[in-house]
Amino acid sequence: MGKLIRLELKKMKLRNWLISVFIANIIIGLWVVTSLPNEGVKSYVDAFYSIRSYVELTFFVMASVLMSKLFLDEYKNRTISVLFTYPVPRSRIMTAKLIVLCSFSYVAVIVSNGFVVGFFLLYDAQASMIAETLTWSMLTDETLRIVINGFSVMGLGLIPLSVGLLRKSVPATIISAMVLGLSYGSTHDESGSNWTLALVIASFSMAIGLLTAYFSIRRATREDMM
């Protein structure tokens, strides 16, 4: 499995994706410090909520683009047939792709949230956008929210894969990810104080995403065999 994962990382050109993540973070950070004053944000809880929403929507879309490269491009370019000639079960090949996709999505969301929050706090220290005092408790709570929400984004981010594999369409995958990202953002609890609910939502999102991905890949693999 390790060799398959390394092969997928090499094929996806991880360095280019890391550069893309960095550029996306800079853009989000600049957007946050220029847009939050116009949104009437008066507290750190509200600011952190907006940051999470922007980051999560961005990486719903970015994950769908990576998803298209890992899965749809293989079918479109017929290279999936070459992969399936390897002396390795097809399920392991697809599992390796899923591991790469899920790992990248989760780590990117966590790191990006941390980066943009740090960017915002550095700016706020100079501009004094928010009058209230920032406490360690606020930062600890936000860190926990980011970690939990990361699982939700990773799980739900797999759902567009079913659309993409069904229609064999990259645009359909990306559009469905955007719709899903906007829908997910509207369900956020701004205070994030109900940790039990947050864990339930994260677990449910993971289960739905993984089940959807499993059945979609299973169907696509069988169609290719036929």
Image: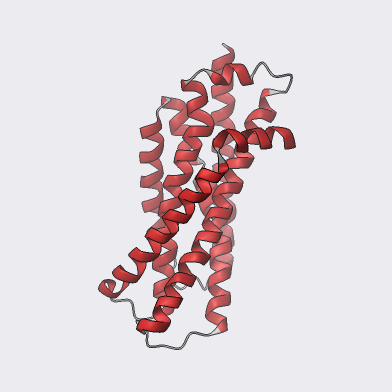
Outermost residue to the top: 226
Residue for point 41% across, 88% down: 132
Q: Is residue 21 above or below residue 5?
A: below
Residue for point 42% across, 72% down: 120
* Res. 100 visible in picture: yes
Residue for point 41% across, 36% down: 173
The residue lying toward the viewer, choosing from 190 and 66, is: 66
The quadrant in which residue 108 appears is bottom right
Q: Is residue 87 above or below residue 27?
A: above
Q: Is residue 103 left or right of residue 61?
A: right
Pinpoint residue 158: horizontal percent, then vertical percent.
52, 41
Outermost residue to the left: 38
Total numbered labels placed on residues in the image: 0
Pinpoint residue 18: horizontal percent, then vertical percent.
53, 49
Pinpoint residue 2: horizontal percent, then vertical percent.
74, 37
Q: Is residue 69 above or below residue 110?
A: above
Q: Is residue 170 left or right of residue 13?
A: left
Residue for point 48% across, 28% down: 72
Locate the C terminus and report the quarter of the image it occupies: top right
Q: How is the image coloured?
A: secondary structure
The quadrant in which residue 40 appears is bottom left
* Res. 1 visible in picture: no
Locate the N terminus and report the quarter of the image it occupies: top right
Pinpoint residue 30: horizontal percent, then vertical percent.
35, 65
